[in-house]
Image: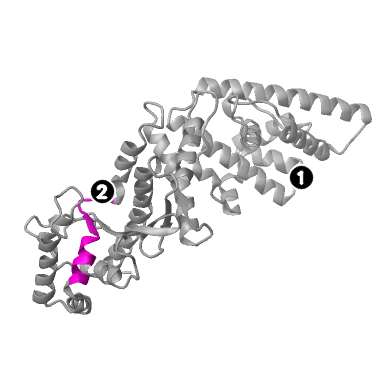
Amino acid sequence: MTNESSHSAAGQALGYVHQCMWALVELGKRATSEPMTQLRLEGLDDIQFDSSGSPNELLQTKHHTGGSGPITAQAVDLWRTLNVWMDLPSPNTLVLRLVTTRELSEGSGLIYLRPEEERNIIAATEALLDAAKASTSKTTEPWRNKFLELDESERLELVNRIVIDDGSLQAARIDKALVEIFRYAYPTGKDEVFIHLLKGWWEGISVQLLDRTLASITGQDLITQVTDIADQLKSDTLPVDPDIFHGYDESISTLYKDRPFVQQLLWIALEDNRLWKAIRDYHRSYTQRSFWLRHQLLAETELSRFAFRLHDEWEQTFDSRVAAMKREGRADYHVVGQEILETLARESRARLRERFDESWFNRGMFHALADGELGHRIGWHPDFESKLEEMLSHVSST
């Protein structure tokens, strides 16, 4: 791939990110005052807002990374957008909004279409007419001709519905807008983690809107999610990192194949499918702990106390099952080890926080202890201690 095509692909990808995240910005602005408004992606336009089942506003987003200069009435982006809007069988009440990261030329009549400016539809229409006649661009020629073919009243009616939001934030800076919109919702000092959680949820929603598994989302849906995230940031619970919900495949097993906790699972002859799921639990738990510590939502001392409670649960179960094994004269040590693992996975009652109750996290933490983390060492095989000593002595001698 050439550098030019690489930059083009990167720019296009940023454009999609900007479109999806700007949709969140726009819905956030409307949610509290218009909770029943519905947002769609790639409907009649990039972003579509419906009210009472009918579209009332369309947004076209244009993302640039710099170096393009100010927007004049001859801009290709502008005429490409007008071409789409001229084909719409829309009512004259439908707002047509262009959101662009570029800025309008202050010498253009288009500045009268800014939302904060005093509107002058005649001046804006004349600027477009002059550009349509004067431009020599082959790219925009069919679109300009279409505009010129409209009668005067049609042109004025079209331009009257247009709003241009220029100088919009680029994709990399959209977090700034989100912080301002949702500042009311989260505890002081938690803006970074709140935005991370909100964007993680919205990424999933965007995919559903684009593949049509979700037709639309309302302002009320957003308010509900914002409230839920704020609740997760309270002191008696913890938020789940959105990355945890992403599917993992068995390729991550190669990251851990030589780890003690995996060897411990092999000693009890755990079959491949369950072994993979145990590794996944460990990976999720480790990822989640790292997320909390990185965002200062959890102290190491609290994690250590939780590890102590897990170790205590394991000790009670392990000692009881090994004692029963000896009484019954059993020799199937690997089966006993599986029973210990299964009992703890099913019956563990330890909680890191009172309202945080994710069973995969406890399962993953047991594997972390089996790996010797957090100052504790547990195991599943009745003879795991001697087997570990043998394994570690072998490693040290090689």
Relative to 345, residue 21 above or below: below
Viewer-proximal residue among 80 and 274: 80
Q: Secondary structure at mark 2?
A: loop
Looking at the rendering, the stretch of residues picked out in magenta corresponds to 153-170
Q: Earlier in the sequence, mark 2 or mark 1?
A: 2
Residue underneath mark 2:
169
Which amino acid type is shown beneath numbered disc 2?
Answer: Leu
Residue 240, image x, y percentages: 53, 37
Residue underneath mark 1:
269
**Considering the image in quadrants, where does the N terminus appear?**
bottom left
Q: How far is disc 2 from disc 1 in space, using C-alphas? A: 55 Å
Relative to 66, is 382 on the left or the right? right
Can residue 261 be found in the magenta stretch?
A: no
Q: Is residue 104 visible?
A: no
Q: Secondary structure at mark 1?
A: loop
Relative to 224, residue 39 above or below: below
Residue 376, image x, y percentages: 63, 25
Q: Quadrant of residue 345?
A: top right
x 57%, y 51%: residue:
248
x 31%, y 37%: residue:
180
Q: Is residue 3 visible?
A: yes
Relative to 287, residue 26 above or below: below
